[in-house]
Image (spheres, helix red, strand yellow):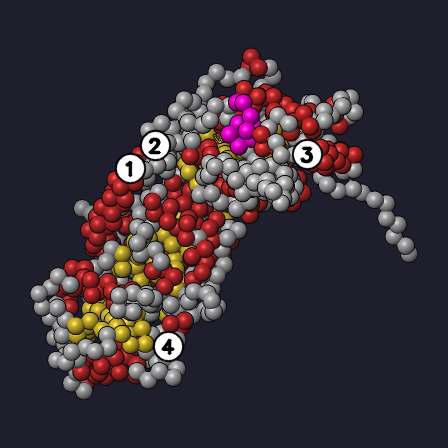
Amino acid sequence: MTEVKKIVEREVLMNGTQAVAHAAMYADVDVVAAYPIRPYTEVMDTISKLIADGELDAEFIVAEGEHGQFETVKHASLVGARTLVGSSGVGWLYAMEAIVVTATDRAPVVAIIGNRALDDPGAYGVEHNDALMVRDVGWLLAWVDTAQEAFDTTLIAYKVAEDQRVLLPVGISMDGGFLTHSEQIVRLPPRELVKDFLPPYNRGKYLVHPDNPITVAPQVNEDWVMEIRRQHEEAMERARGVISEAYESFKKVFGRYPGSTAEIQMPENPFVEPYMIDDAEVVIIGMGTVSKPIKVAIKNMRRQGYKVGMLRLRWFRPFPTQDVIKYLSNSKVVCVIDRDYSMGSPNRGGVIYHEIRSALYDLDQRPKVMNFIGGLGGREITIQDVEKIIKIGYEHRDTPITKPVYWVGVRGDPW
Amino acid sequence: MVEKEIEEKVYKSIIKTIKDVPLEEFYTSGHRTCQGCESALVMRFLAKAAGPRTIVIGATGCMYVANTTYYTTSWIVPWVHTQLGGSGAAVLGTAAALRALMRKGKIKQEPINVIAFCGDLGCADMGLSGVSNAMTYDYNLLIILYDNESSANTDIQETSMTPYGAQTSFSRPGKERRIMKRRWKKNVVSMIIAGHRNVKYAATMTPAYPLDSMNKIRKALSIGGPTFIHSLDPCPKGWDYDPKFSHELGVLAVETGLWPLYEYINGEIVYNEPTKSIVEGRMKRKPVKEYLEKQGRFSHFTEEDIEYVQKMVDEMYEEWEIPGVMPIKSINVKISD
Ligand code: SF4
């Protein structure tokens, strides 16, 4: 008979960064590398205190810069240590070289990205372009919405990253300020249960150790890069299945679906969060905390008879193509809210917009896709903004789209 | 006085005579370095001196590009590449991980040497801040700067390690300006020992003195903590000389006084022969001319340039508080009341 462990969750008030730090503590990380930059820094502030208090046994390296920070965890990971790292905005970019090789060396590092606008001009607020810089280099990327989801996704990230079928780093993005610094109730499961969910990190035959004297990342010149990139791509593809398994396993062990609590009921889909989408003619798409004003606006507009729903992307890499097709194919207009931009791109729109358009391209009956660039640098996307977006989308159910991309609420630019 | 404990560790680790050098090679065939490459010899010495319980981390540079071609890696011990500026962070990550995993019982407790090597750019230029950071921690790790005085794997460009006046593809003498490289070479070991209290061992070496070199690697590893070695590596391709003269140039660099051999052990400077004899006045320094004129990279030098280099070297021995090591002088300052 299998032992049934009683699940008594502790309710604690914490912000997104603290939630991640606690998840890393539960995951028993071995090496943490820190370097300050707002707004992610509090992950490391919290970890440092947890170590000082004896709650977590880990080496805490204060790097000389973000490049060093990411090189440190990459090498720690290659010798078998579970690691935590993170950054924001230009710090994330300063580390970019090390970030790329973390993926190409197949080091299952978990990084927290507290999304922040890129300099210049200096600003602390959220913008997604920082994390999106790695969309093409083989990192798994998740965008979380609540502190609970941040906690849960961190545990899932280790399980997925370290799976022998995957061995890829995971970046968990959270909106700077809106999630990194807003306190919410987080339900913490009993610590012992995490062991049932998360096995120890085992690098197998790729472990760097004198007992296993391998050469990692030798030079291949013009030869072999094709094969290595292809293997990497295949691991990314396998990650889809592994992510689904991890969410199921999480539910089995902790008795609730990741991101859900008694108060919040998340639909059981790892990749996307659909909201009032079943009969929706207009669907709003977003990532991160923008889901909050979207949901309120949808409720308001539904009362006025608008058939509108939301699809929030929870994972961005691998891209949830099948879910996007499944939930959007019956809608008429899709309004993508991008908290980012892609300068000079085909329709002068945002990154998510182009990804969604691409995912829908092969459908015989495809919805129209519109783009709304907003909330850059931490500007609020208000409920009124979303209601206006919904109205614009609704107007185009049967009329052709003349202006596919709107910038939301730019001073002096009526939209 | 060097502490007794350190003295014992050092004594146990050193190789007394050339006959006692271990026969096993851990850096072996398969590399594609140039004939007469002294940096390749540094790799061989470090692997031999450190033995099999070692993890080597190599930053981008000649010794990455020429040594670890897929299918023909020359490393018998585990070897990992790090980015050009990543050596300091990579050794930190590796050493920290080993400590955590051993403390937490996740891997067997045993001493494992963690060594990173980096070239001019990876250690003295781009990677300097990371190397410096590693030197402030208390992990057991060794960083070796293999200094061939140029960015050699990208075809001999100037770095901060390139000596005054030397020709590189970034410092070509021309009609208007004969000397393009006007900066004096950085004094890296001095920087390390002056700025990092945790470092108990740092040294200079050159592979022309094999026993001295291997023993310095042994001492660094046995004394432990963060340690640093700067090796001057004659490079036939970049310095433009016949490969058979590699050792001779290493010896000349030391005997002309350009490259003093010394160790820093827990707060004290120890000179090694023949630098010791030079500093103690038992041996006369050879003129730098003998060293310079054997290399094509100085072929544009006039007597005036040679004199200038000679003057700078003379100053190193005659004017500095610690000859050839620290460019400082103590003066008697009266503090008036
Ligand atoms: S270029 Fe110089 S350092 Fe590089 S392999 Fe050739 S001799 Fe050695």
Label number found at residue A406: none
The percent coordinates of residue B91 (x first, y second) are: 49, 40
**Residue A135 placement: quadrant:** bottom left
Q: Confirm or deny contact between disc 4 and disc 2 (CB under 8 A).
A: no
Marks 1 and 3 sit apart, C-alpha to C-alpha, by: 49 Å
Instruction: Provide the residue span drawn in magenta.
Output: B231-243
Question: Hey, what amino acid is under mark 4?
Answer: Glu
Secondary-structure class at tag 2: loop
Q: Earlier in the sequence, mark 4 or mark 1?
A: 1
The percent coordinates of residue B237 (x first, y second) are: 51, 30
Label number found at residue A224: 1
Q: Confirm or deny contact between disc 2 and disc 1 (CB under 8 A).
A: yes
For residue A146, side relative to residue B248 (left or right): left
Q: Is residue B215 above or below residue A223?
A: above
Q: Confirm or deny contact between disc 4 and disc 3 (CB under 8 A).
A: no
Question: Hey, what amino acid is under mark 2?
Answer: Tyr
Q: Earlier in the sequence, mark 2 or mark 3?
A: 2
